[in-house]
Image (cartoon, rainbow, N blue to C red):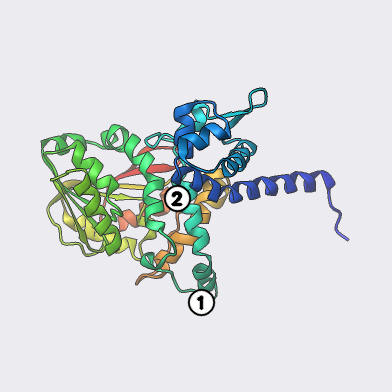
Amino acid sequence: MTHVDEARLTAFVGQVLGDIGGAVSTPLVRIGDALGLYAALNARGPSTPEDMAEATGCDRRYLREWLSAQAASGYVGYDTATGRFALSPEQAMVFAVADSPVNMIGAFDTAAAMLDNQAKVQAAFRTGRGVAWGDQAGCLFCAVARLFRPGYVNALVEDWLPALEGVVDKLKAGATVADVGCGHGLSTVLMAQAFPNSTFTGYDFHPGSVAAAKAHALAHGVANVRFEVARAQDFAARDLDFVTCFDCLHDMGDPAAAAAHIRAALKPGGTWMVVEPRAGDCLEENLNPVGRIYYAASTMVCVPTSLAQETKSALGAQAGEKRLSEVIRSGGFTRFRRAAETPLNMVLEAT
């Protein structure tokens, strides 16, 4: 009989209990966001369940249980002397401040969508077939847009674009830009707002996302942007100064064909910016909390999406810079570098 180390077993059970606690917190966090509970707690300061009921119009008994669960998770603070709950500034940045660079509500939305998607992906394990982006369960597209929004809002214009050689000057003067795989158009609209002399076209192969992107641009009154349904390997634009791909190259069925098409669509001296999940080049380098999240997302979303397409490249969300550089260079790009990075993303520049 195999000897069991009791200390290691106890530690491992504790680890798994922590994981289960995080998993079952997903609906509670989403309720707190949907009903404005985090926002109300942040605005009011230390509050009792009765205070929160008055502020939100929600039932006191439900609020007491929700607040208690949040306190047990360490997501809100609790003062035993006063019986009041509160958000620290740090907790508020994660749960209550929409434009915070570390707002993580979108990650909980994505986790919920992944759980909804289980039956489809589970069936695909046996067939080897994909699950098309448009067939994913739940509003995965909304969740992913919200997940990536804080990074784009806080880093795209301020850090990522200035890290590229000569791109900001072109955008200020007036450039022709394609945002390929634009999703709901958050990245496209942010760039269009920052550089009104340039023109932007967002392309995505999912009609529902393009419709959402058009609505997003209209709501923000942005006139120098438009959106079209098209694939990365055959969108119509030519003579482009700048092309972007945000967190989508690894999802494509044929990223090499996309790279070749983008190279052909760029003017001489044009630049391609590829934002991808941060990853090392081997599994050992990705055995960490960020890699854990990305491998889960890759299993449930990215690989199924790629396998539903024509060539089924299935790079996965943790492809790594070396593999991505091979794909990008295969399209005819001769210069490649990592221009910037965050804890979650790497920004690659190709010319």
Q: Is residue 29 above or below residue 236?
A: above
Q: Are marks 2 and 1 in contact (CB under 8 Å)?
A: no
- Whether residue 331 appears in this view of the structure is no
Q: Quadrant of residue 36?
A: top left
Q: Residue 33: percent from the left, percent from the top?
A: 46, 43
**Total of numbered circles in the picture?**
2
Q: Please state if 175 lies on the left or on the right of 61 as rendered.
A: left
Determine whether the residue tagged by mark 1 lies in a helix, strand or loop: helix
Find residue 48 and name its label. none
Amino acid tagged 2? Gly
Q: Is residue 42 above or below residue 329?
A: above
Question: Dot 1 corresponds to which residue?
Answer: 127
Which one is in front in this view, the residue at disc 2 or the one at disc 1?
1
Find residue 320 and name its label. 2
Mark 1 residue crowding within 10 angstroms, few (<14) / some (14–19) / many (20+): few
Residue in view at x 37 percent, y 56 percent: 141
Q: Residue 15: percent from the left, percent from the top?
A: 69, 45
Q: Please state if 275 lies on the left or on the right of 122 as rendered.
A: left
Q: Residue 262: percent from the left, percent from the top?
A: 23, 56
Residue in view at x 67 percent, y 22 percent: 81
Mark 2 residue crowding within 10 angstroms, few (<14) / some (14–19) / many (20+): many
Whole-angstrom CA distance, mark 2 to mark 1, is 27 Å
Q: Residue 284: percent from the left, percent from the top?
A: 58, 48
Q: Which corner quadrant holds the N terminus? A: bottom right
